[in-house]
Image (cartoon, rainbow, N blue to C red):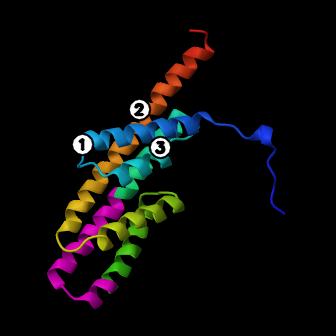
């Protein structure tokens, strides 16, 4: 039987607020800099904030590392696909690319869930667009993720500084 939550136990946490502020800020940045991918930046802002600044920093770096690994593996497959140009070979290359992506994540000692999220980057880069456009997409995805991770870090840092000052009576 599912655990029920009492109405009084439901609340908005500091992390919830930081995610909301960070998401809005990332969308504002996308508005002024349209080359930043809203999806990548927004996803990073949602995934990175943790209960403490230290863990937010680690989550941001892990997220960026995963996107880089997934993006590089996908770019290798895209380059081979552009050169070979056979749909059946592309299908086989995608399977090999996913395995390569997971192995690279393991070598980087990334958590299993982060490795799977990295594979989502691989899938998006290889399948969303066609031809050379996939290479630009990979670069813009990394840029968007970096912006989102930096926004999450900045909001967490500011929030932690303000919250710590309030607790200290400053």
Q: Disc 1 to disc 3, how far (Cα)?
A: 26 Å
Q: Residue furthest top?
A: 170
What kind of secondary structure does the magenta stretch mostly adopt?
Answer: helix
The reply, left or right, for residue 131 in relation to residue 55 is: left
Q: Can you give x and y, in whole percent of width and height, for residue 56 in the image?
A: 49, 40
- Using a 10 Å C-alpha cutoff, classify the residue at mark 3 as few (fewer than 14 neighbours), some (14 to 19) or many (20 or more): some
Label 1 neighbour load within 10 Å: few <14, some 14-19, many 20+:
few
Q: Which mark is residue 154?
A: 2
**Which residue is located at x 30 percent, y 44 percent?**
30
Q: Secondary structure at mark 2?
A: helix
Image quadrant for the N terminus? bottom right
Magenta stretch bounds:
68-91
Left/right placement of residue 52 relative to residue 134 reads: right
Label drawn at residue 48: none
Which tag, 2 or 3, sits closer to the chain's start?
3
Query: Distance of mark 1 from mark 2, alpha carbons?
Result: 18 Å
The residue at which mark 1 appears reads as 33
Q: Looking at the image, is mark 2 or mark 3 nearer the viewer?
A: 2
Q: Residue at x 31, y 62 (%)?
A: 71
In the rendered image, which residue does mark 3 sit on?
A: 58
Front residue of 8/47: it is 8
Front in this rendered view, residue 97 or 146: 146
Is 59 one of the magenta-colored residues?
Answer: no
The mark total stands at 3
Q: Is residue 76 magenta?
A: yes
Please provide percent x and percent y for residue 55.
53, 40
Query: Tag 3's secondary structure?
Result: helix
Comparing 114 with 5, the one in front is 5
Nearer the observer, disc 1 or disc 2? 1
**First of labels 1, 3 by sequence position:** 1
Which quadrant holds the C terminus? top right
């Amino acid at each position: 039987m599912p655990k029920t939550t009492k109405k009084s136990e439901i609340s908005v946490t500091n992390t919830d607020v930081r995610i909301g502020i960070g998401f809005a800020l990332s969308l504002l940045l996308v508005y002024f800099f349209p080359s930043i991918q809203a999806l990548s930046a927004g996803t990073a802002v949602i995934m990175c904030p943790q209960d403490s600044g230290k863990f937010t920093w680690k989550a941001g770096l892990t997220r960026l590392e995963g996107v880089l690994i997934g993006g590089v593996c996908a770019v290798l497959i895209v380059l081979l696909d552009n050169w070979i140009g056979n749909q059946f070979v592309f299908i086989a290359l995608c399977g090999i690319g996913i395995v390569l992506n997971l192995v690279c994540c393991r070598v980087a000692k990334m958590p299993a869930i982060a490795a799977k999220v990295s594979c989502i980057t691989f899938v998006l880069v290889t399948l969303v667009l066609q031809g050379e456009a996939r290479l630009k997409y990979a670069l813009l995805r990394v840029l968007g993720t970096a912006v989102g991770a930096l926004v999450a870090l900045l909001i967490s840092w500011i929030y932690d500084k303000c919250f710590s000052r309030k607790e200290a009576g400053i």
